[in-house]
Each structure stands twice: as C-alpha cells, then as structure tokens.
Amino acid sequence: MFDPRLRTLAVLLAAGMALAAGSTYSIVVGGQVAPDKAIVVNGKTYLPLSVLKALGIPYSLRGTTLTLGGSAPANQTPGGANQRASLEGCLGETLFNGIWRFRAIKLEPIVKDAGTPLQTQGWGVTVELRSGAKAMVQPVFTGLRDQGIQVAFDDAQTLTADALDVQKLTYANLPPGGVVTHQLKFWYRYDTPKEQIKTPTKLLLEINPNGFENAIRASGASYTTPTPSLRVRLDCQN
C-alpha cells in the first residue's frame, strides 16, 4: 500500500523542480525549517535523507540501493478492491488474531428452492472458527459483524452472507478451545442470469472490537494485532 507520507515527499520534489531560479532551496517540513537544503544537479532537485527522517519515512541505504518505506505487514496484501486492513491467507490456512483461530475449508456452488421459479444460485464457504479465549464467548460480542461477512469478486462486487444463517456462526457459544464448523451461504438474486454468476476470489470477515472492550476483557483474551479482521483468498489452497 502506498504510504501517504511518500506522497508528501513527491509533492516536495515536484515543487522543488518547479522553481526556476537558484541551485539550493530551503525545505519546510511540517511548518519547521529543515537544517539541510535541497540542491539542484543537472536540472533535477534532490532532497537530503534527513528530510525522510523528519517525515517519518523509513529508509535503508545498502550499497547503491536506497529503499523507501517498510515492507508490507505479514499476512496482509496491499492495494486492490475490498482492501480492509486484515490478516490474510489461503483456503485451508489457519489465521489467528489473538482471540479467534479461523480457516476457510471449502468453496462450492450451492442452490436453494431447486426446480421452482425461485431457484437461486449461490456460493457456500465452509469455515471453522475456534476460540482462543479463556472463558465462554460469542463471536458477535468480540466485534464480528454479520453484515461484515462477505465474498468479493475480481470486479469489486460483493455478496453478504445469508442474514439469518450466518448467526449460527456469529452467535455460537464457544467455551475455551471450542470450535464451530459451518457453511456460510452467499446468494445471488433468484433472477440473476447465469452469465453473471462468477466465482468469488475472497472471503471477508470484518471484525471491529470498538464497543466490545468489556466483553473481550471478560473473555480472558485480547486481539494481538491492530487489524483483527480476516481475509481469505479463495483462489489459492494451502
């Protein structure tokens, strides 16, 4: 994911190159005048590394290579559509955020009301959710939202899990180490043309612990990552 501070640096560079006169320029960072100056060499404006430090941009200089910004966090894929800050893995891979151990086991097409005018196509994702808490806990009271469970497609479209069926997962009473295995169901409208039914590429589980601090504390566990939401790539198998 592109660091917004790098955008600031790019603006500074562009502004420097736009100046017509002089071979050195004073630099203002966050309203403060920097001790070092920008210089012009062969018509190009260069900033000292001290400016990166002032902007809080990590960098490393090894040999003839200057690397800006840090690496992407483990289990997190930057960029693209439907990008919530999340732990990410493939089908069959266990993701752990400090409270929940989660894995998606299987993706398959499903049908309801078969043979009737209301026959509906959809996708089923079988998942396993295991508690890492030290007391009885329900996922919904740790920030796992019913409406935040979706499958996403390459074209950025999403389907949200069946509103009633999903509660078999989110309202499950799980003791320490307890596990629930459930097929999440995602339905198209019954009149969706077959050519518009595509295979999803991601399973998204949004977890927002805000407002559930007391329940999480009572569980005897806590999220060990600032991004406890979960994302499973359905197009790869672990």
Image (tube, helix red, strand yellow):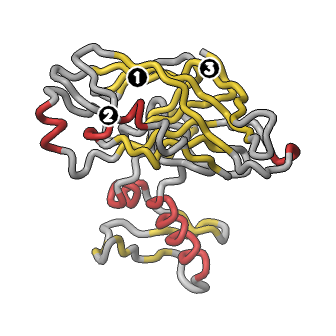
Instruction: Give the residue type that dot 1 points to.
Output: Leu
Mark 2 in CB contact with mark 1 (< 8 angstroms): yes
Q: Earlier in the sequence, mark 2 or mark 1?
A: 1
Kindly state the secondary structure of the residue where label 3 is placed. Answer: strand
Query: Does residue 199 appear to the left or right of 234 in the view shown?
Result: right
Distance in Å between CA atoms under marks 3 and 2: 21 Å
Note whether 181 is above or below 168 in the view shown: above
Query: Does residue 154 appear to the left or right of 180 in the view shown?
Result: right
Distance in Å between CA atoms under marks 1 and 3: 14 Å
Image coords of residue 61 (percent x, y):
47, 39
Image coords of residue 57 (percent x, y):
40, 52
Within 10 Å of disc 2 (Cα), the crowding (few <14, some 14-19, many 20+) is many
Q: Which mark is residue 1?
A: none
Q: Looking at the rendering, which quadrant does residue 113 occupy?
A: top right
Instruction: Give the residue type that dot 3 points to.
Output: Lys
Image coords of residue 30 (percent x, y):
32, 72
**Residue holding disc 3:** 106
In the depicted view, which residue is nearer to us: 36 or 158?
A: 158
In the depicted view, which residue is nearer to us: 95 or 113?
A: 113
Instruction: Give the residue type that dot 2 points to.
Output: Pro
Note whether 93 is above or below 80 in the view shown: above
**Residue holding disc 1:** 129
Distance in Å between CA atoms under marks 2 and 1: 9 Å
In the depicted view, which residue is nearer to us: 139 or 90?
A: 139
